[in-house]
Image (spheres, rainbow, N blue to C red):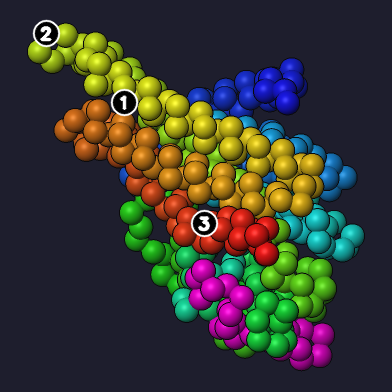
Amino acid sequence: MDFHLTAEQVAMQDMVFNFMQEKMMPQAARWDEESFFPKDVLRHAAQLGLAGICVNSEVGGSELTRLDYVLIFEILAKACPSTAAYLSIHNMVTGVIDRFGSTEQRQRFIPKLTSLEHFSSYCLTEPSTGSDAANLKTTATRNGDHYILNGSKAFISGAGESDLYLCMVRTGQDGAKGISCLVVEKDAPGFSIGKKESKLGWHSQPTAMLFFENCRVPLENCIGVEGHGFNIALSALNSGRLGIAACSLGGATQCFNLARRYTHEREQFKQRLSHFQSIQFRLADMYTQLEAARLSVYRAACSLDAKEDNAHLYVAMAKQLATDTGFNVCNEALQLHGGYGYLRDYPIERYLRDLRVHQILEGTNEIMRVIIAKKLLQEME
């Protein structure tokens, strides 16, 4: 095991850090306050190769590793976990088309995705099927050279701003084997967007429902083979869970650094807060928990890169640990700021609101524990 990054990875981190400091950090609070989706800044990120990180270079991708991927999103989330998380989701969509799409589909869709000429959304969740995704209800029935879609999707990041929607729909029998993966373009007849949701956090990216009412989608927009959509969705979620885990690490690390600085500067009872042993212990625990979560995320990324059989297990553990730890560290940082941490004049509360949803999306942390326990108990049989 080598815990040192390569010279190329360090240089990549420096590039991403400079982008984050110059383009994201100064504006993140405004994006949150105004619920502003920063398309121009995201397109600048695409110019640096951050919209197709693990995508093949022949279609405009950067062709980097999963470890590179988490290093990038850990840094971006130090400024704005919400915006970083959207870019992670976009990368997930682009990666699915690159891995499972035909040569024609890859050439048709991916160059505009890696340049962010087109934005994208990942669409699995429905109003009545969250964790029980294999029982999704949206149908796609063949009609000539088109599918006719009917149904809806819920909690879709980027809805209303995206140009492409990667949708899991039912083309066959009940259960996982009847699900297929389709690209729905924003101008498809019968496709509409619901009202923009008012959320606790993630204000810099829109979230809304999607509606399909006899929506016509060309057969040629089916990614992979009919009936393989659920496996495609699970594969995509491995990437998505790593991205969200990395975003939690980045946001929580920023909150830890703010708390460390605050306790070093703030005085009570004629001494700095950082001189109290109880404060020292809390900072030590926060840092230790973050480092343990970071190692778990890096381990999971390396397992995906190595195509290990248990990669999904490491990803589930990393997602659960990093998002739980990330929120807890943010909460501790807010507590260390006292009343000031509760004010919007200080950034802690924004990170707290943004990181809370990471314990829910890309598979709830309860589902992560189900995945882990199932694997452990299978080994006993």
For mark 3, does the 10 Å Cα neighbourhood hold few (<14), some (14 to 19), or many (20 or more) residues?
some
Q: Locate residue 345, reporting x and y percent.
A: 25, 32
- Vertical comparison of 145 with 123: above or below: below
The tag on residue 282 is 1
Q: Can the viewer see residue 85?
A: no
The kind of residue on which mark 3 rests is Arg
- Vertical comparison of 251 with 97: above or below: above
Residue under pointer 3: 369
Q: Locate residue 305, reporting x and y percent.
A: 76, 42
Q: Secondary structure at mark 1?
A: helix
> Separation of disc 2 and disc 3 at Cα?
46 Å
Residue located 77% across and 72% down the image: 228
Q: Locate residue 363, reporting x and y percent.
A: 53, 60
- Vertical comparison of 78 with 277: above or below: below
377 relative to 83 in the view: left or right? right
For mark 1, does the 10 Å Cα neighbourhood hold few (<14), some (14 to 19), or many (20 or more) residues?
some
Would residue 142 be counted in the magenta stretch? Answer: yes
